[in-house]
Image: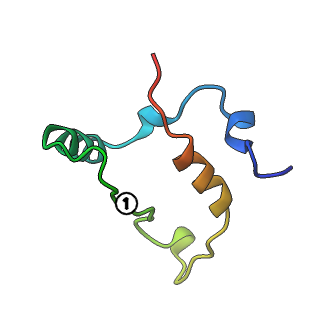
Amino acid sequence: MAAKNLLKQVYKDSLSLLTDLYELTMAYAYWKNGLQDREAVFQLFFRKYPFGGAYAICAGMEVALEYIESFRFEE
């Protein structure tokens, strides 16, 4: 299955509400200070290596980028 539009195929609803409170607070602070049109940088990360291992393999970046590019709140 092609990664393009994979999120739309798997999830019918927006995943935007899964955003943690810190990111929403930072977005509000940007807006409140008139910085909403300024470019910002955020990171994707994990807290510990899975399965007790000592390394991780990064896969699925195209899906992660699709999620970020289509991130929207809707009514």
Q: Quadrant of the C terminus?
A: top left
Image quadrant of residue 13?
Answer: top right
Q: Is residue 23 above or below residue 60?
A: above
Which class describes the residues within 10 Å of circle 1: few (<14), some (14-19), or many (20+)?
few
x, y percentage for residue 24? Answer: 28, 40
Residue furthest to the bottom in view is 54
Residue receiving disc 1: 42
x, y percentage for residue 48? Answer: 43, 70
At mark 1, the secondary structure is loop
Disc 1 residue type? Phe
| 42 to the left or right of 70 | left
| 19 to the left or right of 26 | right
Q: Who's the residue at 44% across and 37% down the image?
A: 18
Q: Is residue 59 above or below residue 64?
A: below
Q: Who's the residue at 63% across and 75% down the image?
A: 57
Q: Who's the residue at 42% across and 32% down the image?
A: 17
Q: Who's the residue at 52% across and 35% down the image?
A: 15
x, y percentage for residue 62? Answer: 67, 59
Residue nearest the viewer, comparing 3 with 48: 3
